[in-house]
Amino acid sequence: MCKSKISLSIALLALSLNVSASSWNEIRKQRISQLLPKAMASANVDAWISICRENNNDPLAEHIGCENAGAPAAVIFYRSKSKFNSIVFSPVGEATALKEMELHDKVVPVPRGSSAVAMAAELLNSLDLKTIAINSSVNNAQADGLSYSQYLTLSELLGATKANALVSSEELVYQWLSIKLPTEISIMAEAARITAQWQEEAYRQVIPGKTTDAELAAFLKSKMKQLGVTDAWAPDQNPNVNSGSDRGHSHATDKVIMPGDIIQIDFGIKVEDRWVTDIQRFAYVLKPDELEPPDNIAHYWNSAKAGSRAAFAAMKPGARGVDVDEAQRKVMESQGSLPVMWSTGHPVGYVAHDTGPNLGGSRGATVRPASKRKLQSGMVFAFDGFYSWTLPSGGVKTISVEEMVEITEDGAKFLTSPQEELILIRSKKYE
C-alpha cells in the first residue's frame, strides 16, 4: 500500500475511534447539565419549553432528546431555587426509550388521546415563573422551531397572565449552542484535518488542460462516500471547486483547469450526522515556463494569508466579531485588494453557519446583530483572509484563506495545520 493510502487509513481510523468513543447521548447529557443552566441564567430565563412533533420537527429536537416524537411532545427545562430541572411529556410509544436514555430528570408518558402540551402548560402554570422561553426568533433559525399553531395552542392553555411571560429563546439558544464541549472540539479537529488532507489529495489529481472543476468535486465526493460522511451544507454546492472568476456559493462546473489558473476548493464534511467542517485550500497551476508563481500571484497569496493571520491574532475571549473583521480588512486594504461582500468569518459546528458571533460588520461589510457579540472560550469559527483582484478577462478573482479555529482562554488555536503556501501544480513541460 502506498504511503498516501496508509496515511489516509490511519486518519480514517483515528476519526472512527474519536467518534465511537463519544456517544452523542453522553455529549448532549453534558451539554444539558453543564452548559444549559449557565445559558438560561445568562439569558435571564426561568423556564424553556420546546414542542416537538413528527416529520416537521423543531431544529433543536436532537439536542434535547425529542427527535423521535410521534405525537406532539413537550420538553421543559426550568430553574428553581434548589436545582435545575428537566421534564419531558412524551407520547407513550416513545417514553420507555426516552427514560432509558437518562437524558432528563423525569419522563411523563402521555396516554393516547391526551395532550402533552396541555400537561406541560399545567406544570408551567403551577410554577412561579417570570420568563418562559419559546422557540420563536427573527434572527436565528435554530431558535425558530415553534409553529404558529403550536404557539396559539400553548398561549391559550397558559392563559393571559402566563402567556405574557413568553419570550423568545433566541438569547438562551445563542448562549447554549455557541459553546462546544472539549470532546466536540476534538471530533471537529480530526474532521478538519481530514477535510484539508482530502483537498490536498484532490489537487494531486489535476492534469492541466484536461481535468475539470467538476471532476475534482467528484473526487472529493468519492472520499466522503468511502468514509461514510455527508455534506456540511447544500450537497449541490459542496465542494465548490472554482478555477475561474468568482462565482460565490455555487456548484462546480465543467470548466477545464488551465495553466495560470488559481483553483479554489471550498469544502466541508459532516461527521456522525452532527458536526461539520468548513475549510478552503488554494492551488496555482504553473505555466509551462514557470517553476514558481509570478510576483503578482505571490503577492495575492501572501496578502490573503497575512489577512488571515491578522484575524487569527485578533480572536480571543472578549474581542468582538466586528473587531476581528476590522483587523483582517485593514490588511486587505493596505495590500491593494478590492473590497469583498463576505464577512471575515462565522461560527461553525452543528451547521456550517452556526450560532455565535459573526466576524463581520466593519468597513461597509454587511452588519449582522451578532457582529457586536464577544468571542468566548469554547467557540469554533471558520474564517478567511481575503485578497481580490480583477482578471484580464474582466472578471474578479478572490483568494479566501479559510481555516478553522477554537477559542481558548489564551486566544485562537487552529483545529488543523493552516495552509502556509500555495499548492503548485506543474504543467507538461516540467512533468
Image: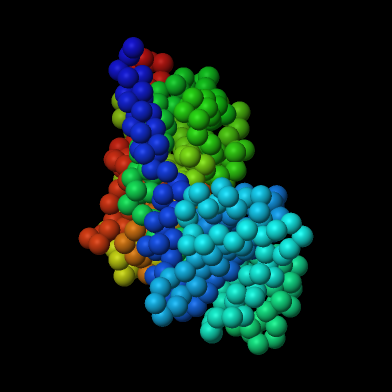
Q: Position of residue 194 (x, y in %)?
A: 38, 34
Report whether 154 appears left or right of 268.
Answer: right
Quadrant for the N terminus, please.
top left
Q: Residue at x 43, y 55 (%)?
A: 29
Q: Hey, which quadrant is residue 19 in on the image?
A: top left
Quadrant for the C terminus, please.
top left
Q: How is the image coloured?
A: rainbow
Q: Is residue 380 above or below residue 159?
A: above
Report whether 272 appears left or right of 295.
Answer: right
Q: Position of residue 173 (x, y in %)?
A: 50, 66
Q: Residue at x 50, y 78 (%)?
A: 46
The residue most toward the top is: 1
The residue most toward the left is: 410
Report whether 194 appears left or right of 414.
Answer: right
Q: Is residue 328 above or below residue 418?
A: below
Q: Decide which of 54, 189 is in the foreground and name it.
A: 54
Q: Is residue 128 above or below residue 137?
A: below
Q: Residue at x 66, y 81 (%)?
A: 163
